[in-house]
Amino acid sequence: MSLTNTVCRLAARPVGLPKPSDWEIVDEAAPSPADGQFLVKVSYISVDPAMRTWMNAGRSYVPPVEIGEVMRAGGIGRVIETRHPDFAVGDEVYGVFGVQRYALSDGRDVTAVDTTLAAAPVHLGALGISGLTAYFGLLDVGRPQPGQTVVVSGAAGSVGSIAGQIARIKGCKAIGIAGGHDKCSWLVEELGFDAAIDYKAGDLRTQLKTHAPNGIDIFFDNVGGRTLEAGLARLARGARIVICGAVSQYNAAEELRGPANYMQLLVARASMTGFVIFDYADRYGEAVVHLAGWLRSGELQSREQVVHGDVGDFPDTLLALFGGQNTGKLVLALDGGAR
Amino acid sequence: MSLTNTVCRLAARPVGLPKPSDWEIVDEAAPSPADGQFLVKVSYISVDPAMRTWMNAGRSYVPPVEIGEVMRAGGIGRVIETRHPDFAVGDEVYGVFGVQRYALSDGRDVTAVDTTLAAAPVHLGALGISGLTAYFGLLDVGRPQPGQTVVVSGAAGSVGSIAGQIARIKGCKAIGIAGGHDKCSWLVEELGFDAAIDYKAGDLRTQLKTHAPNGIDIFFDNVGGRTLEAGLARLARGARIVICGAVSQYNAAEELRGPANYMQLLVARASMTGFVIFDYADRYGEAVVHLAGWLRSGELQSREQVVHGDVGDFPDTLLALFGGQNTGKLVLALDGGAR
């Protein structure tokens, strides 16, 4: 079998938003599996804000993608050639396959995907890392109690949209922060958020005061910057800030903006806690049972925005994410543009 | 009895460091106690960094001192006139008596001071709010385990010097951050800190790396700003940052500096938690028993720096605090300049 792989490699460390010259898209011969390996044809690539952080040098929760390396990405594909005892040709699998058409794997951290349960993109969204992040971030780090007020920033994104819905399921008042009327309508009308705040329409702090008159018990933050500061300014006594992401800061070319009013943590006797989803790997099963149950019962809605294209469309798809153009989980389908 | 009271009132809200014109020092007739009240002659005034925050308008953990009000301050004094059944003339008491010579009280939040146990200034330091703050901040918020690395900023201050010593008592490695060689020597040689870092001598981050090679488990922060950022940059997995104060920021005339690298909370799966000592009021007794025991056994050293003067010396004494001139607990003794 002689296959041509299309690969998206990191060519340079971006300053600010990634430029075309920060990427190198190349065709090369697909590798052949050695003993204990298999080859996956990637069908769907997960496009996530955190990817931008992987492109930077320096200490983070995962090593940086090195210059010249295939860009890291979670994805779903099908095994097309195998010399691994546990993976058969035709298996649909999830793994960190990278932004490429064909990926070699030794099976580590690769899991089976049951597409009879839900379509493949859902396994990148509500039933994938996004859903798991929302689940453990909200429930384990946030510790919601019925009747509490939960504010989610980046609420129309893949993690935020699920976090807010889980808050509702757990009997909390769920308030989303998102950009634009359409996203806000979707949050309230489709997903059942109690309220949604359009940060582009009017002062965020004033709107938070209106919708969270008794203060915020849990602030689930995907955004950082001024949004985090607005949340800090309205904390209820004993509040928990769950630090999930900081999408407003990922493309900052200069020094990041720290929350200038972090001393509100003292005023409110509150905490701000970071987490990394991989730490919960041994409890993914428990979470998926709940998430799948809520999807089945209709309590949880999953939305995926699937961009049809090729490996070469990855750079623009990533930029669309930072332009706030997606609603729900952004996925790049490697189907050559819906052919 | 016709007594002249000297009173220090807040005349204006300071921008940056308080100026002489931000204060009004006036002589006026001392009040007479009504039924259920008593009059205290104040002997010692507690001088604390947090005082600067009380001078600002806006939401905090206590209401701001209003313009024209007597400056708020904890103090120790003696009851000299009483119409309160629980307080007798001659009683030595602690209370928030304000920066003035004579204070009227209804007994609320006033506690007896046992000067046979320790000298009065110690009751403002290790056995007072400073000691209690160190005790509950380190033990309840920080939750130290034996063998963990505890870094205390503002370590030569009233709270920091005690927090570091309690860390040692609990079997932790205690590292202090302070300004200048003398303070650092005192921390290590007198108080038994494992190490002290002079932030004025060399790069703080490099020094933290040297002294906390395995990372910081608890960062007890009294300073904020760049110091907090240096701590964030060296957190161990699962670290706790205890937000006790932010003395580097209290006199900022412009917007405060938030910790630009707060996303290290995510990288380290760490938390940053604020607390207010008043919440622990029903457990003060428990803490004082331990603190007094450690003082008695010599495990805990208390140092008070007593400035002898009058009410009119309060503004300069407060400035000395922000100039980093004190070691240990700063106290203004109203004895007219050691007469």
Image (cartoon, coloured by chain):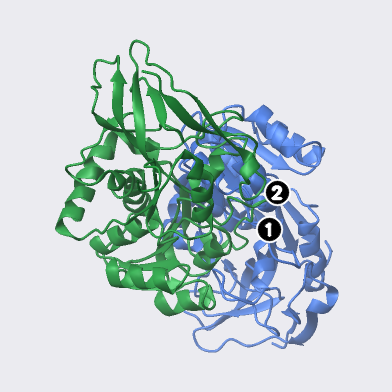
Chain colours: A blue, B green
Q: Which corner quadrant of the image does residue B220 belong to?
A: bottom left
Q: In the figure, A266 relative to A284: above or below?
A: above
Kindly indicate whether the residues beneath marks 2 and 1 are on one polypeptide chain: yes
* Residue A290 showing in the rendered view: no
The answer to whether mark 2 and mark 1 are in CB contact below 8 A is: yes
Q: Which element type, helix, strand or loop, lies under badge 1?
A: loop
Determine if residue B12 is in view: yes
Judged from the image, the secondary structure of the residue bearing numbered disc 2 is helix
**Residue A77 or residue A85, whichever sits in front:** A77
Classify mark 2: residues with Cα within 10 Å, few (<14), some (14-19) or many (20+): some
What chain does mark 1 sit on? A
Image spot of residue A286 (x, y percent): 43, 51
Q: Nearer the viewer, residue B249 or A164?
A: B249
Q: Is residue A278 above or below residue B329?
A: below
Q: Which residue is mark 2?
A: A226
Label 2 lies in what chain? A
Quadrant assignment, res A10:
bottom right
Image quarter for residue A128? Answer: bottom right
Q: Residue at x 69, y 75 (%)?
A: A71
Residue plotted at (58% across, 46% down): A220
Residue A253, horizontal then vertical, whole percent? 76, 68
The amino acid on which the numbered mark 2 sits, given as a three-letter code, is: Arg
Q: Is residue B204 left or right of residue B11?
A: left
Sequence order check: which comes first, mark 2 or mark 1?
A: 2
Q: Which mark, by number, is residue A257? A: 1
| Measured Cα–Cα span from mark 2 to mark 1 | 8 Å
Residue A92 vs residue A143, the one in the foreground: A143
* Placement of the N terminus of chain B among the 4 image quadrants: top left
The disc labelled 1 sits on which kind of residue? Arg
